[in-house]
Image (tube, rainbow, N blue to C red):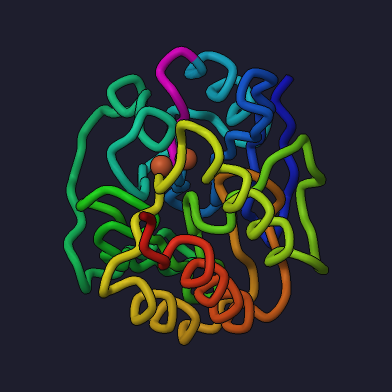
Amino acid sequence: MTNVTEIAPDVYRISTYNENYKLQFNQFLVKDDEPLLFHTGMKADFPHIREAVARIIDPATIRWLSFSHFESDECGSLNEWLRAPRWTLKDETVNTGKYRFRLYPTHHLPHSWDAGMLFEETNRILFCSDLFLHGGDVEPLNETDVIGRARKAMVDFQATQLLNATPYTVHTERLMRELGSLKPRTLAIMHGSSFRGDGEKAFLGLASVMKEVLGKDEQ
Ligand SMILES: [Fe+2]
Ligand SMILES: [Fe+2]
């Protein structure tokens, strides 16, 4: 079952709960003159994600595809969506009509060398991929506790085969501070509820949780 919720003006969260992982997998569609999809979802999920997009717009009108890094949930169905690709570069803004996007390189954050985060500057929405991941079939939008949930998931993951999925590097703290300084008002989170509130505070809070949970040396 795929749910669609408008979490910010013209930003639709397309959410599918995976019972095996006990985790939501979310894509975000931004409705504008040139519609944009952040995260394509896995290849096998393409038919029902496309169907969910079709509840909002004609999927053939999607003009921009964006994703944080090269993994199956972030971009597995890229080929299914692609027609005429045009790559965007660092420092390039993309205007889709009412909205303006910029992609920030965030190497190894949340993971993978190629990682990046997409920021919509008009409504200050940060599409932050696996950062703030938390489990459960949770509500679309949360305005209270994002750090507590993310901390719990981070600690829990350290006891599974997904431990250290987010590497803690010499760049982590600076990148988290820089992302926070964008002062996002909405965090469009890939796994779990989106968050509306003080995005800078949330980033600083998550940075200290990451240092505490991921930044210690394991014997
Ligand atoms: Fe990922
Ligand atoms: Fe992911």
Q: In which quarter of the image is the N terminus?
A: top right
User: Residue 118 or 6: which is nearer the viewer?
Assistant: 118
Magenta span dominant secondary structure: loop
Q: Position of residue 96 (x, y in %)?
A: 41, 59
Let me know if residue 123 appears in the view.
no
User: Residue 97 or 44: which is nearer the viewer?
Assistant: 44
Q: Which residue is painted at 73% across and 63% down in the image?
A: 148
Q: In this view, does 145 lie above or below 161?
A: below
Q: In this view, does 164 lie above or below 43?
A: below
Q: Does the magenta stretch include residue 43?
A: yes
Residue 14 as seen in the image, left or right of residue 76:
right
Q: In which quarter of the image is residue 216?
A: bottom left
Residue 35 as seen in the image, left or right of residue 56:
left
Q: Quadrant of residue 201?
A: bottom right
Let me know if residue 68 appears in the view.
yes
Magenta region: 39-44
Q: Is residue 41 magenta?
A: yes
Q: Quadrant of the C terminus?
A: bottom left
